[in-house]
Amino acid sequence: MSKSESNVAATPTRCCPAMDKMMAEHDQEGLPHWAVECLNRLFSSLADPTRLRIIHALANNDRLNVTELANHTGLSVSAISHQLRLLRDRFLLNADREGRAVYYSLADEHVRTLFCIGIEHAYNDCNNSLRREAERKS
């Protein structure tokens, strides 16, 4: 048994199995720089209302093209297209061409799970005054 394997077995599970693996591989406490950068890109990708609407539409539909996404979100095709490129570049979406149409889908279940957990947090845990304030703004 290697030193890193014994450390994983001896310590309680952190927030998730991936964290246990990362800590074993890097044999250090705290997040490695690359993980911080990756998480920053992930969460900044989701910190935009248009991108959240796209993720929401795709979380509820297996795949949609740009026109369908525009209809689902109430946004223009050009606004959607720009954000789709960013989400694809950050590995959150897949794009599959069928003839002249390109269909988009969530890259994997992690994206759907992350979005759904965010919705649960917003619905269950956000202060009611924050919810009322957001509703007034919309």
Image (cartoon, helix red, strand yellow):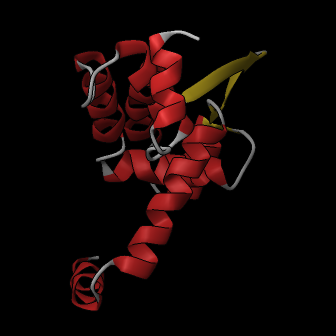
- Above or below residue 97? Residue 108 is below
On-image quarter of the C terminus: bottom left
Residue 74 in the image: x percent, y percent?
48, 58
Q: Residue at x 50, y 44 (%)?
A: 13
Residue 51 in the image: x percent, y percent?
40, 44
Depth check: 34 or 84 in front?
Answer: 34
- Above or below residue 3? Residue 133 is below
On-image quarter of the N terminus: top right
Q: Within the image, what quadrant is residue 105 found in?
A: top right
- Above or below residue 55? Residue 99 is above
- Residue ranking furthest to the right: 98
Q: Within the image, what quadrant is residue 125 found in?
A: bottom left
Q: Residue at x 49, y 29 (%)?
A: 8
In this rendering, the count of numbered labels is 0
Is 99 on the left or on the right of 37, as rendered? right
Q: Residue at x 78, y 15 (%)?
A: 99
Is 96 on the left or on the right of 77, as rendered? right
